[in-house]
Image (cartoon, grey):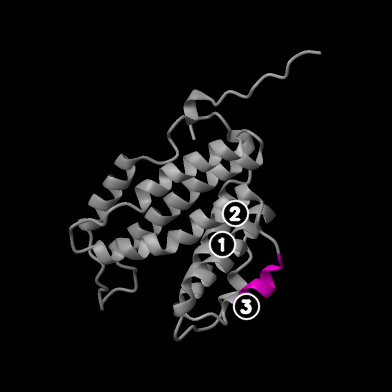
Amino acid sequence: MAKKKEKVEPQSVLYYFYTQERWDNWIKTLEEMSFEYDEDSEEMPEGLQSLNNFTEDINVSVLKIIKLFLLGNYSGEAARKKIEEVEEIVMGPLPESDIADIVSGVQMRFLVLFAGCKAVIDGTATGEVKDLIKYGRTLGDDQAEEALKTAATVCALVIQGGSSCCGKYLRGEMDDPTLFDDWLIEVDDIGNGLKTLKNFDEQFGEGI
């Protein structure tokens, strides 16, 4: 019986999911931008526009790793290692500048991205999204660990389902959003990021 060939990672995707240089360039860009609203303009401040692109870039970079895992191109061990490489960059020291608080907020939102992706790899996500969200919204900020665990489970289920789920739960005004609500917004963004990778299996090896 012929020995099954081991899958070899294409050179075009080696180590290019996310890099320290990429992160540093984003930070430098954000430091040079204004986050102040112009009363005479309806447009979002350039800093917030760039921040949206910044966070979308991280989401998609990490989701590519998970997509390759789900396609069977990465083992769980390999996928986790690559995700932890990105996590180390994103969750690193805060910049010594005026945008430190902004970056801290970015790091907080991405806790659910990394936790959710690891739950996908471990295969630990169970439950119904609707029930999990209902439960998560009973949790206060003093229950951050449980809120993150619940949001990460929702995140994993969204990734495994291949589509967004949370927009309908975010309609209306949230006068006093909790940490769980903030993480739910990130999960919704993750779902939108997945849509951009719908045909990712067809693009594999093309310089992602």
Q: Residues within 10 Å of mark 2 (few under 14, many from 20)?
A: many
Q: Is residue 19 above or below residue 151?
A: above
* First-in-chain label (3 vs 2): 2
Please provide the residue range marked out in magenta: 127-135
Q: Residue furthest bottom?
A: 175
Q: Which residue is mark 2?
A: 119
| Placement of 36 over or under 6, stated as above or below | below
For disc 3, the marked residue is 135
Circle 1 packing at 10 Å, graded few (<14), some (14-19), many (20+), is: many
Q: Quadrant of residue 167?
A: bottom right
Identify which residue is drawn at 37% across, 51% down: 90
Q: Secondary structure at mark 2?
A: helix
User: Where residue 28 appears, x then y in whole percent?
Assistant: 23, 50
Left or right of residue 182: residue 22: left
The kind of residue tagged 1 is: Ala
Residue type, label 2: Ala
Identified at 68% across, 73% down, the residue is: 130
Residue with the most extreme right position: 1
| Image location (x, y in percent) of residue 161 | 69, 55
Q: Are marks 2 and 1 in contact (CB under 8 Å)?
A: yes
The answer to which image quadrant residue 9 occupies is top right
Residue 134 counted in the magenta span: yes
Residue at 40% x, 64% y: name it: 108
Residue at 73% x, 15% y is 3
- Quote the CA–CA distance across marks 3 and 1: 13 Å
The residue labelled by disc 1 is 152
